[in-house]
Amino acid sequence: MNELDVVGVRVEMPSNQPIVLLREVGGDRYLPIWIGPGEATAIAFAQQGMAPARPLTHDLFKDVLEAVGQELTEVRITDLREGVFYADLVFASGVEVSARPSDAIALALRTGTPIYGSDGVLDDAGIAIPDEQEDEVEKFREFLDQISPEDFGTNSQ
């Protein structure tokens, strides 16, 4: 497992499909995951430190975990099958619960929980861009502007 940071969320054109971009900590791979608009909003709110007037679903889940004394210790993006990403929520008690990566990421950002990606997922869907190569980073930005969910054969996660 490789630790990942959330780079951000953006809407890709012309598909108008949100994408969350994760970056390998200490590495040069990026992991783009197509997500739904609700999850994109939840991730963006958490990244910006915005608190809605009433709790969103992910805020509610965080509050419930705190109320029952359950700690989320890891989020793992574990698999990519037929264009669909899979994740697990890992709790201090040892319990693991399957989740959509977008929901898991939104919850991890709210709880300060580390996010990890399996070697297999990063090998299959990760895109290597060395930090020192600015022209490569620009090419990646151009790539994001041109790619569509159909290119990965994925649906919203």
Image (cartoon, rainbow, N blue to C red):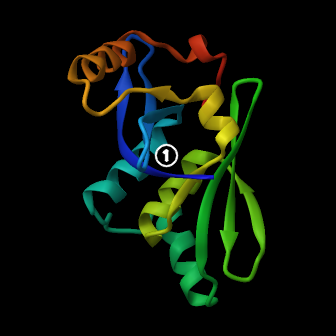
- Of 53 and 32, nearer the camera is 32
Residue 157 seen by the camera:
no
Q: Is residue 80 above or below residue 25?
A: above
Which residue in the protein does label 1 denote? 39
- Of 26 and 50, nearer the camera is 26
- Splitting the image into 4 quarters, where does residue 12 fall? top left
Q: Is residue 114 above or below residue 40?
A: below
The answer to whether residue 79 is left or right of residue 62 is: right
- Whole-percent x, y for residue 85 in the image: 67, 37
Q: Dot 1 surroundings within 10 Å: few (below 14), some, or many (20 or more)?
A: many
Q: Residue at x 54, y 30 (%)?
A: 126
Q: Is residue 136 above or below residue 57?
A: above
- Of 94 and 127, nearer the camera is 127
- Whole-percent x, y for residue 83 in the image: 70, 25
Q: Residue at x 75, y 63 (%)?
A: 97
The answer to whether residue 141 is left or right of residue 1 is: left
Residue 58 seen by the camera:
yes
- Whole-percent x, y for residue 151 in the image: 58, 11
Q: Secondary structure at mark 1?
A: helix
- Whole-percent x, y for residue 54 in the image: 38, 68
Q: Is residue 130 above or below residue 101?
A: above
The answer to whether residue 79 is left or right of residue 12 is: right
Q: Residue at x 43, y 61 (%)?
A: 109
**Amino acid carrying mark 1 in the image:** Glu
